[in-house]
Image (cartoon, coloured by chain):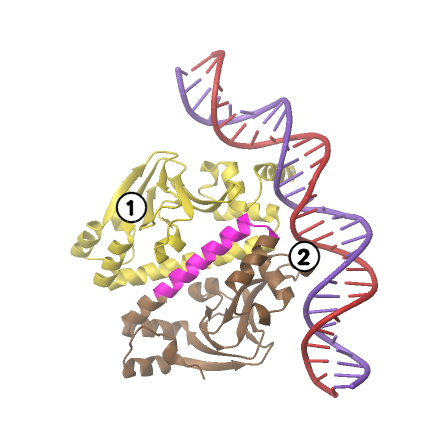
Chain colours: A yellow, B brown, C purple, D red
Amino acid sequence: MKSITEIFKGLELTDSEYAFIKERCQEVALKKGEVLLRKGQPTLSQYYVLEGCLRSFFEDAQERDHTLQFAIHDWWISDYTAFFDGNPAVLTIESIQKTTVLEFTRKAQIEIFENIPKVESFFREKMEHSFGAFQKRIINDLSKTAKEKYLDFLQTHKEIETHIKNYHIASFLGITTESLSRIRREIAKD
Amino acid sequence: MKSITEIFKGLELTDSEYAFIKERCQEVALKKGEVLLRKGQPTLSQYYVLEGCLRSFFEDAQERDHTLQFAIHDWWISDYTAFFDGNPAVLTIESIQKTTVLEFTRKAQIEIFENIPKVESFFREKMEHSFGAFQKRIINDLSKTAKEKYLDFLQTHKEIETHIKNYHIASFLGITTESLSRIRREIAKD
DNA sequence: TGAAAAAATTGATCTATGATAAGAAAAGAC
DNA sequence: GTCTTTTCTTATCATAGATCAATTTTTTCA
């Protein structure tokens, strides 16, 4: 079983530092299809995926859903607008496989930052990389065709692509499942 | 003239801490149209806008450009994928008005973090908010029509909208300038 | 202030993707 | 292993936004 030690790999924490962190997070197990966070709820926590796969998505006024993020082992996920600002969630997070996560509340996280500064640095760096990934995502959304976006997705999500339903991929790419199907046929021809 | 003291407003830094920071950043003045960072260059710095307006954009294979971000007074801007990971820039940053920025190199920033931990917390929080803004941007890109995106832009960029050329706004929204023009006509009718 | 350049608009097509509807294939349930 | 449900594909038609080609309006600066 994956555990807390590997979250902070590279950090060289002492046993008492680990213990301090361990007391401030909680393991949560989810069956396939279960909801971890529902839109409208207060978003008090951020989640680290130990095993399985989660998906965060936005439901628009026409009840179509738009996938913001997939998260597998060693990824973090939350509704960041809500988590950081204390607003109710606009996203819903659901498991698309049997999943285990570690839950860190905002309060716990801040306590940890205050007591173990190198964890704050660690999180800042994590954040910076995710920030870069979001920047890249926006650029892709603006500049690529649906087909290019799909090919790009296959590259950037190699390890998870096989577990994920095509309609979820379509929702991540911002196209309909029918369009994705046409694109897949075209690619298969090549 | 806007200056360094207001960057960290709310932080209550001592004079010597200010001095420490001041020695590690540099004021850069730009004429309208000048380039601050060009794609392909190493991205060693992050910029804080004192006055004026900058734009970061991506040029695709067809030489069309796609605006990622506008930055005015009190905003930070860089090519984050490049800045954080040490890769060459994929974005170009240009001034679209006479602009003054404070330049912080990565090295300087890390020195500051190590010596004044509360500045690191401050940056982490800045980052978190920007992260939330990017999340919102992606959701908008996925779920809204061009018209809705434009109306949203007018709201979220109230203070700067008047200085910015429509073709830059179009490039931010991911549509052509002709389409934006049609959308504007439609809105004017209402 | 008036000519040149830059920016915005308009009209006429074209095209990628959406919507709808139906059938085929795959996955799960019993 | 068959039945049911879910997922994926295919076909046809509709549409938002792109492209191309002028033209008008606004800005710049000599």
Q: Main secondary structure of the magenta part?
A: helix
* Quadrant of the rendered image containing residue C28: top left
Percent x, y of residue C4? 78, 79
Of B119 and A162, nearer the camera is B119
Reply above or below: D19 against A153.
Answer: below
Identity of the residue furthest to the left in this view: A16
Q: Chain of mark 2?
A: B
Residue at 34%, 49% in the rendered image: A42
Q: Residues within 10 Å of mark 1 (few under 14, many from 20)?
A: many
Reply above or below: D26 against B177.
Answer: below
Q: Is residue A15 left or right of residue A28?
A: left
Reply above or below: A14 against B117.
Answer: above
Q: Which residue is mark 2?
A: B189
Residue at 39%, 75% in the rendered image: B7
Please check the rendered image and state whether residue B134 is part of the magenta-colored stretch, yes or no. Answer: yes
Q: Over which residues does the magenta segment extend?
A: B124-146
Percent x, y of residue D28? 68, 80
Dot 2 and dot 1 within a common chain: no
Residue A102 tag number: 1
